[in-house]
Amino acid sequence: MIGILGNLVSEITGPSRLIIDIAMFFGLQVIVAMALNFQYGNAGVPNMGCAFQVITGAFTVSAITTRLAFWFAEQAGIQLLPYNTGQLWMWNSNNNVFTTNKFLAPNAGLSISLLLFSLAVSLVLGALIGYVISLPAIRLRATYLIIVLIALADASQIFGRNVLEICGGPLGMYVPNVFGWYPGDRSLITAIVTMTIGLISFFIFRTMLNSPYGRLMRAIRENEVTVGSVGKNVTGIRRNVLMFASGITALVGVLNAFYASFVVEGAYQRAYWTYWPWLMLILGGPGNNAGTFIGTAAIIALRRIIIVYKFNIESLIFFPISYFEEILLGVLLIVVMIFRPSGLIPEKLLYIPGLNYSKLVREEVKVDWRAATKARKGKSRFSFRRKEEEE
Amino acid sequence: MEISAIYISTVVYSSLITVLSIGFTLTYLTAKIPNFAHGTYAGIGIYITFSLTRLMGLSPYVSIPIAFLFGGALSMLIFILVIGTLQKIGGGAIVLTISTLAIQIFMTAAIGIYAFWVLLTFHTYTQPFILRDNDIQISGLPGVFPFALIFCIATVIVLHFLLTKTNMGIAMRATAEDPSLASVLGINIYRVQLFSWFLTGGLACLAGSLLPLWFSSSPITGSGMITSIMAGSLLGGLDNIYGAIFGGFVVGTSEQLLTYMLVGLFGNYIGEYRPLIPMIILIIVLIFEPRGLNGVYERWQVRKISKARVVEKSNAQEGA
């Protein structure tokens, strides 16, 4: 089956690469945006540190998985250049990765288990980071949480730049290719894996949101004092939400690292991994996954169009296009917040599986509505005003 | 008179951070949101000085009133267009905070575009630049050293009188305490907020206009300072302007002097971690004393009052 896919894929070149690219970035960003929707749209936790969690996943690949792959290669008797100090890690890891890739290419089982290992480790590390963040920040005001998370996202970049053992300093480093067993285009299989993980996480989020726990989350968003007063652990629920969503966000870093085959801290700026997902969430409408999908698709399409027609746009403006993108981001965020506060698709009533809504309406509420319409006829706001005027 | 460059850096930087922290706290008090664009006002001030000095050949101190008025007008415009509108719609604190982040991104890009335009038109190097050569010398010292210190002290004194003696200041304090109660008393909250945004924007822009006289500056300098400003503000407790004076001074001093001392102890590589110092201060404050020094002060006051009451009670009992 892999062979058939490979034959199909070998024909994919040129413009079709763009489609794969868009699918890949859509898959990556939609996971971040869905996790954000889970945190902010449903539980009311404003996580402004998505970049921090994504960079955790990327550093997992460069610092842990790469070392493990080197270890496996050395066990198989392949001579690698020394990599025990930070300097040697920076200088030699690119050569070592090249050697290791040759060893990994026929070993499909080992490659897949390395991928699964890095996903699992990043999930655990992300959850751990969510827990650590939640310790000081969750009982504080929401604005404090934003401040702490933005500061942490910057701090992680500083460490990535200066601790050479993580990702080789500011120059970055290559990471092993875990899709070497696939005969066709490597970016296609990465995109398929990313979309699969996105789909799985979508169903997990959907199930969680429609469960009693999801309703509890929405209740906390609306009024945490009331939820606390009926005996629910508000702090604990928020901590769990942050841990779960942080873990899922960290997966994105792993997938991005394997897609690019390269990890460098500069690629994980907070503008790209925090503010753009927030714009997607706010544009689509916080609180529902359909809105998140539409918002992500719109923004990814916009950004890709800007990149494809880069030279046409640059002939119209005199300044570099990166500034244009930043201005667009700022203006769009403010315009959407002022003119479309609830997003393109406003939040709808919760869908609870197994509950017959039409039956509910027919049986119970119908009677109330009749009574209400009768009552409303006399006391409508406008008729009330008219009466006042007549008097 | 000779003063080592590190002490000049410390004094100038901590004075400016103090003023910026005061402004940040003032905005937080009246609007109840952290204004992430506050550091970017300083970035605009930096480029006002740059334009006046490098392009027009004026003294850098001419930019002081211009920067104040321009920053104030810009801040008022932001309040009218974005913050006030969002408040009317009914956006919560989180929505308003995100809008300030969006303003920060927008303004940083605008400064970058301006720097690029200057580079294209006048062919001068715009980022990073430093204006130490354009500064005046006062008895062997660079003029920015006394000016920054005087500016910081004058701001504190003027703000103190503004907040305690004038009607507008008292209205501002009332709005900070309880906006709805203040509006019941006939205070126009919108106007008070507009005034406080004008004041903070102007002060921040002014502080930024003094920065390139001693420090190397680029379009992202202003927005990069926001962590230090927030750390200073939080250390003082976000509810108290007098706390922000102390907090800003501590953060500014530790960022300059502590880094210098640590570099002397451990070697040059420590200098790379300088941005971590305000972050560490910020997180430690949030973990152990979320209300900053103001919380410590209030607890001390409460303990003093309760002790006095215990003494009174025991005296009364003895008397009986």
Image: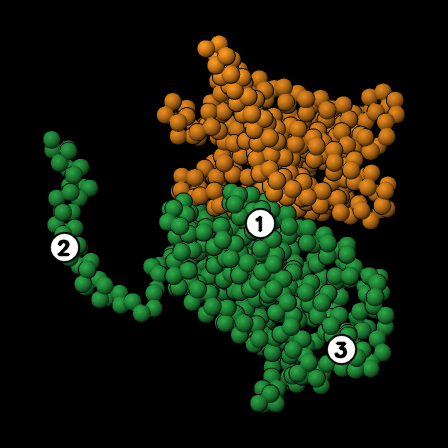
Q: Amino acid at mark 2?
A: Arg
- The image shows residue B9 at horizontal and vertical percentages of 78, 33
> Which residue carries the number 3 mark?
A72
Q: Residue at x 74, y 33 (%)?
A: B253
The chain under label 3 reads A
Q: Is residue A196 left or right of residue B215?
A: left
Chain identity for the colour orange used in the image:
B
Residue A139 visible in the displayed image:
yes
Depth order, front residue of A113/A203: A113
Q: Helix, strand or loop at disc 1?
A: helix
Q: What secondary structure is marked by label 2?
A: helix
| Element assignment for label 3 | helix
Q: Between disc 3 and disc 2, whose residue precedes?
A: 3
Q: Is residue A136 left or right of residue B43?
A: left
Residue B217: where, in percent of width, then height?
Answer: 74, 40
N-terminal of the two: label 1 or label 3? 3
The residue tagged 2 is A370
Percent position (x, y) of residue B244?
62, 30
Q: Establish if A276 lies above or below A143.
A: below
Q: Let me know if marks 3 and 2 both belong to one chain.
A: yes
Q: Give above or below for B252 relative to B160.
A: below
Q: Residues within 10 Å of mark 2 (few under 14, many from 20)?
A: few
Q: Residue at x 58, y 86 (%)?
A: A5
> Residue flagged by tag 1: what amino acid is it?
Leu
**Separation of marks 3 and 2 at Cα, in angstroms:** 73 Å
Q: Is there any visible trace of residue A303 in the rendered image?
A: no
Residue A135, disc: 1
For the colour green, the matching chain is A
- Residue A114: image location, x then y, percent: 67, 75
Mark 2 falls within which chain?
Answer: A
